[in-house]
Image: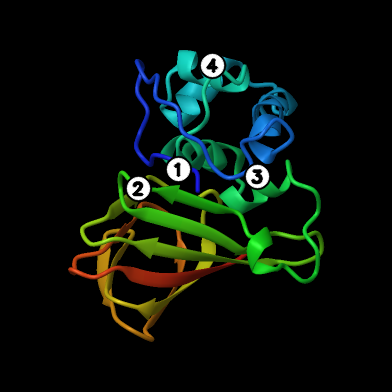
C-alpha cells in the first residue's frame, strides 16, 4: 500500500507523497493536469492561488507540472480553494464509479507518519448528493483542517470503534463506540485519537 504524508507544505517543501493509483495510467498521473485546468477555469494566476491557499507559488507550480505529488494537507487546501471535497476532486480524474463499489475499488490513502488512513467507501457520483468516507486514526494521531471545502457543508461522523476527539468550530466533542455527531462545518475542524487504541469512524458528507 502506498502512503501519503499529511502535513502543511511550506516554501521549501520538496517532500513527495504517493497514493494508490500512482502508476502511469492512474489517477495520480492525471491529477496535476486537472488541478491546472481548475485554476485556468477560474482565471487565477499561481500567485492568486497561493494567496487563497497559503501554499507557496513554487510548490503549486511544481505540483501542476507533476514534479511532486500532493500531501493530504496540500490537497485539502486546494479542495477548499476550489470548493470541492477531496472525493469529488479525485472522482474527476477517475472513470465514473459504478453503482456497486466493491471493496477493492475503493481508493485508500495511508499516512503512516501521522497515523491516518482514509478510504473512499462511496465516492461522488453524478446525480447523487452523498458520499461516504471511512477513517482510521492510530493512537495519538491528530489531523487538523483549516476550513471545509464548502462552507456550511453537512457532515455526519459515526464512531465504529475506539474514541474520537472531534473539534468543530472550536467546540470539542468526545465520541465513543456508536456515537454520532451531526453538524454543518463553517470553520476549522480537528480529528484526534486521545486513546491507546486505534479509532475507526465513518464520515457521511451531504452536498448542498
Residues at badges 1 and 2 in contact (C-beta under 8 Å)?
yes
- Percent coordinates x, y for residue 40 in the rendering: 71, 22
Q: Which residue is mark 4?
A: 62
**How would you rate the neighbour count of disc 1 (Cα within 10 Å): few for under 14, some for 14-19, many for 20 or more?**
some
Above/below status of 68 relative to 194: above
Give the left or right position of residue 50, taking residue 32 as reference. Answer: left
**Do we see residue 207 in this rendering?**
no
Q: Residue at x 70, y 30 (%)?
A: 24
Q: Which residue is mark 2?
A: 112
Q: Nearer the viewer, mark 4 or mark 1?
A: 1
The disc placed on residue 3 is: 1
**How would you rate the neighbour count of disc 3 (Cα within 10 Å): few for under 14, some for 14-19, many for 20 or more?**
some
Give the left or right position of residue 7, taking residue 69 as reference. Answer: left
Q: Disc 2 or 3, which lies upstream in sequence?
A: 3
Secondary structure at numbered mark 4: helix
Secondary structure at numbered mark 2: loop
What whole-number distance in Å separates the C-alpha atoms at marks 3 and 4?
Answer: 19 Å
Residues at badges 2 and 3 in contact (C-beta under 8 Å)?
no
What whole-number distance in Å separates the C-alpha atoms at marks 2 and 3?
Answer: 23 Å
Q: Disc 3 or 4, which lies upstream in sequence?
A: 4
Q: Which residue is mark 3?
A: 89
Q: Residue at x 33, y 49 (%)?
A: 144
Give the left or right position of residue 84, taking residue 203 as reference. Answer: right
Q: Residue at x 48, y 42 (%)?
A: 76
The disc placed on residue 44 is: none
- The part of the image, by quadrant, that contains residue 61 is top right
Q: Disc 1 or 2, which lies upstream in sequence?
A: 1
**How would you rate the neighbour count of disc 2 (Cα within 10 Å): few for under 14, some for 14-19, many for 20 or more?**
some
- Percent coordinates x, y for residue 91 in the rendering: 71, 49
Secondary structure at numbered mark 3: helix
Give the left or right position of residue 12, taking residue 74 as reference. Answer: left
Amino acid at each position: 500500500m502506498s502512503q501519503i504524508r499529511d502535513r502543511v507544505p511550506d516554501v521549501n517543501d520538496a517532500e513527495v507523497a504517493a497514493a494508490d493509483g500512482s502508476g502511469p495510467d492512474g489517477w495520480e498521473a492525471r491529477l496535476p493536469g486537472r488541478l491546472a485546468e481548475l485554476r485556468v477555469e477560474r482565471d487565477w494566476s499561481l500567485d492568486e492561488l497561493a494567496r487563497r491557499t497559503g501554499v507557496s507559488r513554487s510548490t503549486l507550480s511544481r505540483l501542476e507540472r507533476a514534479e511532486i505529488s500532493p500531501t493530504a494537507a496540500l490537497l485539502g487546501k486546494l479542495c477548499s480553494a476550489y470548493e470541492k471535497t477531496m472525493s469529488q476532486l479525485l472522482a474527476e480524474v477517475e472513470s465514473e464509479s459504478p453503482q456497486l463499489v466493491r471493496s477493492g475499488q475503493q481508493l485508500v490513502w495511508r499516512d503512516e507518519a501521522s497515523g491516518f488512513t482514509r478510504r473512499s467507501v462511496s465516492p461522488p457520483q453524478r446525480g447523487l448528493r452523498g458520499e461516504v468516507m471511512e477513517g482510521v486514526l492510530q493512537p495519538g494521531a491528530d489531523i487538523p483542517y483549516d476550513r471545509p471545502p464548502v462552507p456550511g457543508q453537512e457532515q455526519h461522523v459515526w464512531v465504529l470503534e475506539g474514541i474520537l476527539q472531534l473539534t468543530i468550530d472550536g467546540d470539542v466533542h468526545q465520541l465513543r463506540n456508536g456515537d454520532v455527531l451531526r453538524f454543518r462545518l463553517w470553520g476549522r475542524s480537528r480529528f484526534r485519537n486521545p486513546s491507546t487504541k486505534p479509532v475507526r469512524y465513518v464520515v457521511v458528507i451531504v452536498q448542498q
